[in-house]
Image (cartoon, rainbow, N blue to C red):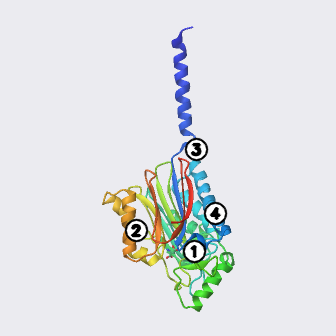
Amino acid sequence: MNFKNYIKPIVFVIITSCLAQKQKPSDVNYTILIHGGAGDIKKKMLTNAQEEAYSQKLEEALKIGEKHLKNGGTAVETVERVIKVLEDSPLFNAGKGAVFNHLGYQEMDASIMNGKTLQCGAVAGVTNLKNPIQGARIVMDSTKHVFLYGKRGQEFCIQKGATYADSAYFYTDKRWGQYQKAVKKNLILLDHSVGKEKKAFKKMGTVGCVVLDAYGNLAAGTSTGGLVNKKHGRIGDSPIIGAGTYANNASCAVSCTGVGEYFIRGTIARDVAAKMEYGKLNLKKSSIKILQKLIQLKGRGGFIAVDKKGNYQMQFTTKGMFRGVANSNGLLEVKMYR
Ligand code: ASP
């Protein structure tokens, strides 16, 4: 038998199996980051059970995101899906378990942005969208606008398929207790306490997600109940594109958490991207510069960011930030403390 006769089929088998390998969903490149708020998060202020609960939920959210990305899901879809998981958990100040405003209502804000198209959507002051991030996505996909607010905005989202939830759904005793305390002390609580009450565990519980998907596209999203005892009608940075959320394939995707007013004044999310676009800094240098700017502004909080190459940053001015990252190289990490 001539050896040459074997060569062709062998080469064919090698090439086709290589191609098949390449297309295996588990081989797609992706990076996903999440946050669950920043604040005075220190080890001694969390019980083991609380630490476990936060870790588990963050890990669950990351794994759901990863699964979606491995199956070919887009960055935008993944951001929405992952934020929904965190909104559905009463642990965080978003969706179920959102904080109460001065009048005792839960008014929620959210936004989402597609880094490929620069399309974006946001809702603010909504009270009955089970998942405010779903409302933001509907605004992005089903309107020519970027931002809808209040009852009318909410009505539109529900007409377009957003899930309605009664006020009772969002209520938790923990948040009600924080609100009562804040009202008594006449404070707008930039921080709020959970956990061991003697040593108040001060944190913010906004949630956010940034993603680089297998198609090389970026997306970002953020969702929050805002600040405890905030002025009714107050809108924070989370739904404001450029302040709390920003994504652009030309630079990076960013989601912020912290005292919103500072992030609005400093256009923090957009600045991280702008330093890369105009200043030609890499993600790390840009993130450090903008964190310094936030500190100069006396802002409290942090942000997560990812670029087109899968480089990522998790920066904060506070003692801690609930955060996590996973990527296609097998990294899966959840952290809380500095
Ligand atoms: N940034 C949010 C706001 O000011 C709060 C937070 O991140 O915890 O509404």
* Amino acid, disc 1: Gln
Q: Which mark is residue 154?
A: 1
* Residue 96, above or below 286: below
Which of the two marks, 3 or 4, is nearer to us in this view? 4
Residue 9 percent across, percent down from the top left: 55, 20
Mark 3, Cα crowd under 10 Å, few <14 / some 14-19 / many 20+, is some
Mark 1, Cα crowd under 10 Å, few <14 / some 14-19 / many 20+, is many
Residue 131 percent across, percent down from the top left: 61, 69
In front of the other: 317 or 2: 317
Residue annotated with mark 3: 26
Secondary structure of the residue carrying tag 4 is helix
Which of the two marks, 2 or 1, is nearer to us in this view? 2
Q: CA distance from mark 2 to mark 4?
A: 27 Å
Residue annotated with mark 4: 57
CB of mark 2 within 8 Å of CB of mark 1? no
Secondary structure of the residue carrying tag 2 is helix
Residue 207 in view, yes or no: no
Q: CA distance from mark 3 to mark 4?
A: 23 Å
Q: Which mark is residue 291?
A: 2
In front of the other: 266 or 128: 266
